[in-house]
Image (cartoon, rainbow, N blue to C red):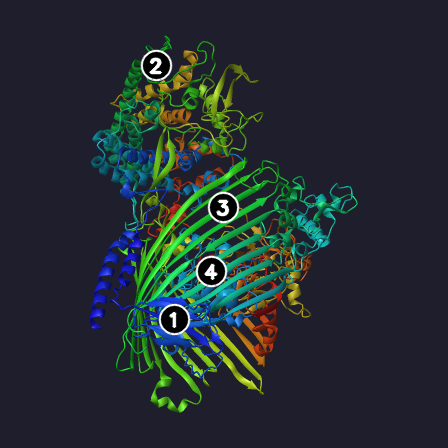
Amino acid sequence: MKKTIKLLSIASVAALTLTMGSCTDFLTIYPTDKVVLEDFWKDKADVNGMVMNCYKNLVSDAFVKRVFVYGELRSDDVIETTNIGTDLKYINNANLLATNGYCDWSIYYKIINNCNIVLHFAPNVLEEDPDFTQGDYNVVRGEMLAMRALCHFYLVRAFRDVPLLKEAKIDDSQDLHTAQSTPLEALDFILEDLDEAEHLVLPSGAYPNELYNKGRFTADAVRAIRADVLLWKAAFTQFKNKSDGSDCKEFYAACIKDCEQIIADRKQYLIDWNKKYNVGKQQEAVGTDPADALVASYPLETHPINRATASVHDETYVKIFADKNDRKESILELQLDEDNNHNQAICAFYGYSETQTNMPFTASSYLGKEGTDDNVLYKKTDARRVSFTNQHGNEEDVFPIAKYTTRSTSVGGTNQDGRPEYFPSRDNGSYSWQNVILYRITDVMLMEAEARALRADSASNDLNEAFKLVKAVYYRSNKVSKVSRNDSIKYSEGSAASLQELVLKERQRELCFEGKRWFDLVRMALRDGTTNNMLNVMVPHKYETNQSAIKSKMASIDALFFPIHETVLKTDTMLVQNPVWVKEDVYSKK
Amino acid sequence: MKQVKYILAAVLCLLTTGAFAQTSRISGNVSDDMGPLMMVNVVEINKDNRIVEAATTDFDGNFVMVVRDTKDKLKITYVGYKDVILDIGTRTVFNVKMKDDNVIDEVTIIAEKRNETNGLDILDREVSVAKQKFSMSEMEGLSFASVDEALQGQIAGLDIVFNSGDLGSGTQMRLRGTSTITGNAEPLIVVNDNIFEMPTEEKGNFDFSTANEESFAQLLTVNPDDIESIEVLKDASACAIWGSRGANGVIMIKTKRGSRGKTQVSYSYRFSQSWMPKGLNLLNGDDYTMLLKESHFNPTQSSTASNAQELNYNPTFSEYENFNNNTDWVKAISTNGFTHDHNVNLTGGGDRAQFRISGGYYHQTGTVIEQRLDRFSTRMALDYFVSDRIKVAADFSLTYTNNDQNYSGLLSTAQVIMPNMSIYAQDPQGNDTEDFYIMRQTASSIFDGNQKSRINPVAVGKQAWKNNKSYRITPQISLDYKLLGLERDETQLRYYGMVNMDAATTSNDDYFPNSLSTQGWLNTDVNKSSNSDDKSLSFTTRHRLTFTPHFNNEKHYFTLMGQFEMRIGSSSNQSASSHGIPHGIFSPTTGSYLTGSSTGTGQWRSAAMSFSAVYSYMGGRYSATATLRRDGSTRFGKAHKWGNFPGLSLRWNIIDEPWMKWSEKYLSMLSLRTGVGITGSQPGSEYLHYTTYSNNGRYIDQSAIQQGGLRLTDLRWAKKTEYNIGTDLGFFEDRLTADINVYRNVTSDQLMGNYAIPNYNGYTSLAYRNTGAVSNHGWELRVDGNRFVKLGKDLTMSCYVNVGQNFNRILEMEESVLNSQNEDYNFNNNTYLGRIQVGNPLGSFYGFRYLGVYEYSYKNWEKALAKMDDPEYTPSRIVAHDANDNPIYGASCPIAYDEEGKVIYGANGKPLQMVFGYEEGDQIYRFRGGDAVYEDINHDGNINELDIVYLGNSNPDAQGGFGVSLFYKRLQLKTQFTYRYGVDVVNQARSDVENMHTNDNQSIAVNWRWRKEGDVTVIPRALYNTGYNFLGCDRYVEDASYIRFSYLQLSYSFDAQKLKKYGLNSLYLSGSANNLFIWTNYTGLDPEIAVGGWGRASDGAKTPRSRSYTLALTIGF
């Protein structure tokens, strides 16, 4: 009896130990439709797929829409129509509520975290897959750092004080709270990323697929972002130190260096490209006009329909925006397409049908109207006005945006006003497949001009250099007689302030609707230390009524930045809201 | 295949080697007084009563056989004769004379009530945990589709609420309150020791907050007629044996098995007729058109807005005849429901085998047209006693249900669709044609908002359909082996092992024909069909050793159980839906526009070990039970895969103490019980602890792979700790029994689903996170009087009462969780601010306080104030409260009052006008005459979020049931009542038919609406799509306390002796009236409202529980 019990107890203890061990295996099941971490990060394809996913998010609706909402909507490039929705309307009228959907910054952090994940895991693949070489890894690392920098950079420009996400978030045991950094801390971190990335990513033109040369981060793209970041660093430094800008010279020097490098690279890239594809000489002959020679000395696309007879119109911008990936102009261009990644933002914001109705905003009449006085941006000779804006049917003062929406231009055809016919893109219903250009050559040239104009002192040649850059950009789109050309662009010789004003204006003329203008204005306000000048430049062009109310809403520099969305504030009580948008908690219930 | 290994091991353990035995050849003859008996069973049985050899007698009563062992015995059995057992020994010839079985010697039966607790079979009087048993025989003659309906009001502390009166819509059950915030709060259902879950729940990713009614109707697959008894485990020390599954309590169902005796056949039939109680009185067509004209006129004060030809009764209008009616839509979709419930069962058995086979067919039609539920069920239970030591049991059950449902809720449409519209299209003479009338898309634009989208409910009922079919097959085989002693006075060791398979398929189909839509052919609603199929298969195996040593000192009793259990299963599902299918075809995969298709698979595994021990001393005077369950789950990462769930309970039978001897006369039981236990719960989805990767489209020409959400390495079991103290009382030989339980439980480490994290981490939420704690405390009382009143010789009375009271409280919660769950007020009509606050219960409503309707517009403020000053005027209306909450009476006009109850005057000498604030300032709404008055709690003249107050809570203060039964000879009269007290419900249905904000039909209450200055009424003016007349406020928060007279039943069972001559064993007749009456102040159709998200209950015009009567007949052969 006793023996039996003893035996049984031994047996049961043995059985239990046995089952305990194998039970943990028994209790491990894997998903059938997904790969788990343990089986991932094994080969080059895994890394590549994850990198592509970062890009995929970069072309997501949320990201692309924010390019325009953060960079464009609040500027004097656009005015609202009656079709503007609540969220956009509030932004346009400087009523920024923390509940506004566009205050949601999650897409940037999603991309940043995806980049961090690749940065975290990709080194392991070096050991796992011999096909994944150190060289491959370097490129991946460079691209991820650059993309992370770009996203952080957008956040700083839109929200100013933001948390920096430096580590990959993979599981719930990590600390999920990060404090905000000051803009200068953030920009320094961004610069670190970019400095490292510059030497890792491929140089422009190195990709065999031409789309990758534009659609992925190349060395020139990294430098372009860095040049931009440096301008902001200078602006924030000047704001912080309440200085006259003399403490920012090193940033401008670095910015100029980057821009020069890009322009030089780009020229070389074109030579290489021509060689590679056996194009020989450029087909367009450079005229005897010194202005043409100036334009031709930069890698600028020129494409007049008929150089002899054309009044104002040429096809340059159709080449750049509709034909996509213009090899001279574009440096970083998000690749959207008809099949996988539609561009819904363009349709939603700039309109899509031939008649362009229902779009929430249009070009302000300051951009749409032609003339010679100061109330219009473009002179009569400027091809960009008709390239960037349309006229809406018979309504004289409504100017739908033509940039990005123009798909083709009919050669020789004119409308009743005698203007060449443009056809806005008519894409498949609610989406378009236009690319979005983040940086192109004229942007870089004008950044250099801005840096030079700001650095200029009596001793340097900066003003002349800067003016040359501005002229090159301007002449490309103003193909009329020499006389009028000389009339149309000038600044008070020796006055840096006058040249700064000219650069700002030229940037608007060239880069309007590309998500640049608002940031240019904010930079100016930061340098000034006050929003006064900036508002005086902008408000009269944008708002017909309530100008003083708008000005008082944006009297504080803080008001130029977006509030943090309330869902984030709710989940992180330590986060500090932009002081102008702090809403007192109205709930106090029992 | 791992489980096979364990099963094999278990079987090997059982193999014992037999000793060599001596064989012998024997022969003999069997006869009775009349001569030789043919076909008599002659068997050799060993010491365990196991049959080792068998023979039968021939025509002359002779038999020959070889016996295996001469130590065995010879057993001779024949129907109608007494068994004969003889030693074999050296004897080789056996001539046996058998005796008639008619003479029965005196038999003494000692019965002890025994009870299965924590996997152990122990005496009732030693049960130390909180539980309650319910015998289904109490429900004989009543008609239930599923057993939860029968349980309502029967178990103290178990709150059962019907989801709706639609067929097969199931119930919502809460045992001792809700202790989880986002997880499943339903108690675990266990049928014959097997967890009874629908595959959809098991495979995870089951969202309980959006679960539809079908998912709660799982009990439909158990025929109530097959149920023997139900036991509800209430406290954690009882539920700990179910570990992670038992956190919400356990409902254990035991089905009937065969019993020894003559084979008996019984057939029962129940017939019921049911109908819907009278609902809201709605406007007829004439009143409706009048109202609509007014509501469209009011906002703009312009008659063009209200000039819709559908409302004009203009005979030149081409559709005039279709819009000049007074249609009672609710009546048109209502019907009488019928239930036919047939059950046959066959039960019987002898020494060796006992069986029960049953078959049931249940057919029910609903109280709303075109609802039909059919169920066919069969269950077989076979117990085969191989010997005294070994028992093999086989069980098999199959249930098929076919539920024809309405495509969409007909009643909710019928209540709001235009009553001046006709059901059938009418010809120019006003006669109905055969076609249903559906409002054209070309109808007036004022109907764009809603009436055009409302589809004729009669037509939807007749032409569109939705069908749910399910098959469920659960075979089971088990083995019971007594390894050591057989008798009580020996040391016993018992092995029990079983394998259970559960195979289920469900399919859902629906179809929506183009005849119901006036949209174009390409509309996705036209000829739409969808189909989804789910199938699942799961295996459970369980092995248990029970050890009961025998002590020489019989004061000690001890028993110990160890059990190992594993579950494994998989499921797959697919669905497809498409539209634009050719007429007459219902398959979504025929050439048409595919709107969606999906497939999916699921798998699950679990393992658990449990141990329990019971010790009792002095015949149960003191007893203790301890349990421990170790649960393994696939849903946690390595560190937290296993959870331990212990329970301990003690009982002291005070009545057994010698110093209680004096009370013997009155008291039959007095005990004190106490217990503590921990149960747990796991998250609703699998694979949470993995980082997963899946495809995500492309960029340029390369495919992208995305990483899934943050993996949860830190996720732990939610733990519920419960303390219970109880007492059992018995008076007059247990004729009157009572038990009282007081409990408190705390569920900490709550599994908060979709836990919001700062989105700068790249993710907006974690799938789950352990956070927060909720407590429930309360008490239950049950009193049972079993024929405890004797009135005269034959008349006796039984009664029972039970009451349960539970208090729920959120103990702790992270601020970020509170912040992200508590939405901001959105200034819209019809929304109740949901808030969870630490220290408050779940399920609270917040909103405005409603004070009536402004009699005067602001421009008439002088008139209103003058009226108050008029000594003739008797102030009857409260217009505000002062700081001390004293009411201020007066004629109401939209002006502000300060804290002292004085009118606030502005700088211009005029009173401050009440406004409805909107923070950005561009949409201020100024109140005027006829608008709803909301109390300005902070006296700032602005109704905004600062005026929101607590309005109520959906947790019942108390609930339970009671009943009285009278017995007179063979006649029985039974009544049952259920009640819930102190429940607040948002009467959404009433708000929908009183708001006059849309084109929906309204109730007749709106005929009392405010129409002109000075009108005193509580119904605001009609205002189409404007104004704030139905903000979330206490006007619609109603007390849904009720007492329901569940049934009144009269039954008679005939005397078996008298039936014999008709060849019957038993005959039982009964008639009952169900849901006879309901006492309530609730103004909706039915105060029984299930709670939704965050525990708040809102009544959205669900089909009410029907009234019915049932006639039942049971015959035994």
Pointer 3 residue: B532
- Kindly identify which residue carries mark 2: A296
How far apart, in angstroms, are the residues tagged by discs 3 and 4?
A: 30 Å
N-terminal label among 3 and 1: 1
Asked if badges 3 and 1 are on one and the same chain, I answer yes
Mark whose residue sits in front, 3 or 4: 3
Whether label 2 touches label 4, CB < 8 Å: no
Find disc 1 in the rendering and name its residue. B116
Q: Is residue A437 left or right of residue A123?
A: right
Query: Which residue bears the numbered disc 4?
Result: B1095
Q: Which amino acid, by three-letter code, is at mark 2?
A: Ala
Which of A170 and B1117 lies nearest the eye of the viewer?
B1117
Q: Nearer the viewer, residue B912 or B679?
A: B679
Mark 2 Cα shell of 10 Å, populated few (<14), some (14-19), many (≥20):
some
- N-terminal of the pair, mark 3 or mark 4, is 3
Report how far apart the C-alphas of labels 4 and 1 lie in the structure.
34 Å
As helix, strand or loop, the secondary structure at mark 2 comes to helix
Q: Residue at 41% of width from left, 12% of height from top? A: A482
Q: Residue B466 placed where, x, y %?
A: 56, 49
User: Is B857 located above or below residue B978 in the figure?
Assistant: above
- 2 and 1 marks in contact (CB < 8 Å): no
